Every structure is written in C-alpha cells, then in structure tokens.
Image (cartoon, grey):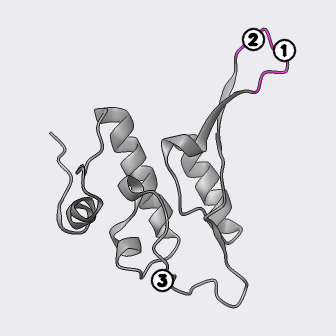
Amino acid sequence: MLSLLSAINYCHKNKIIHRDIKPENILLVNSASNKEEFEYELRLIDFGLSHIYSKKDQNSILNSSVGSPYFMAPEVLNEYYNSKCDIWSLGILFYFMIAGIPPFYSDSIPELFKLIISTEPSFK
C-alpha cells in the first residue's frame, strides 16, 4: 500500500488524478538488476481515465462519473469530486486485499452504487 500511496502522491503533486484504481491496473515488476534475484515493485498503470489539471483549474471540482464500479468514491457517483477520489479507491483496494471481498457488493450496479453512497463498510 505504501508504494501505491507514493505513486498517487506523485500523481497528485503533478496535477494528475488517476480515477480508475483497481487490481487490474497494478503490475508487480521484478526491478532487480540481476534477473536471477527478486526485488519487486508495484506499478500503477492505465491512465486512460485520468484527468490532468491545468494550473488554472487545480482546485476545481470534476463532475463526470468515471471509473470501475466497485472502486468508485461516493463523490464520483454524485458527480462532485476532486483528487481525493483516488484515496477512496486505494482504501477499497486495501480493504479487498485484507478481507478478500469488497466492502460493498451487489450483482446489480444501481444497487452497488446505493450501497457505496449510503452504507458504512463492515470492519468485523
């Protein structure tokens, strides 16, 4: 998680919001100089839904609902958000890594969105 938080911090400092953080957009790379050794790094990929702020609109609010449903922040669903939506997605990812299940689940996307907006995750 520290690697991913560091990657998002770098993006945000450079005025980039990823907006689609999910397991499929994380790579595990062997970065050892000697390929017989193993030294792994996580890499965040797929910036196809990202938003780059210009200097003028750095503090502006975004209003397009984009991303992967299970990892979308309530603010994104309400179409009024900023870069903090990436932090929510990292939290959902971390929960999923620890618990093995997403904190909000439904077979129906509209029901999933209702759960994300109105339900607190269980930490049992």
User: In this orientation, which residue lies closer to the viewer: 107 or 117?
Assistant: 107
The numbered dot on residue 63 is: 3
Residue 61 point in image, percent of width and height: 51, 85
Span colored in magenta: 31-38
* Disc 3 residue crowd, few under 14, some 14–19, many 20+, Cα 10 Å: some
The numbered dot on residue 37 is: 2
The residue depicted at 41 percent of the width and 45 percent of the height is 93
Q: CA distance from mark 2 to mark 1?
A: 6 Å
Q: Quadrant of residue 27?
A: top right
Do the numbered discs 2 and 1 sit on residues whose CB atoms are within 8 Å?
yes
**Residue type marked 3:** Asn
Tell whether 13 sits left or right of 35: left
The residue depicted at 37 percent of the width and 50 percent of the height is 92
Q: CA distance from mark 2 to mark 3?
A: 46 Å
**Residue type marked 1:** Asn
Front tag of 2 and 3: 3
Do the numbered discs 3 and 1 sit on residues whose CB atoms are within 8 Å?
no
Quadrant of image for the C terminus: top left
* Disc 2 residue crowd, few under 14, some 14–19, many 20+, Cα 10 Å: few
Q: Secondary structure at mark 3?
A: loop
Residue corresponding to mark 1: 34
Q: CA distance from mark 3 to mark 1?
A: 46 Å
In terms of sequence position, does the residue under pointer 3 or pointer 1 come before the other? 1
Q: Main secondary structure of the magenta part?
A: loop
In terms of sequence position, does the residue under pointer 2 or pointer 3 come before the other? 2
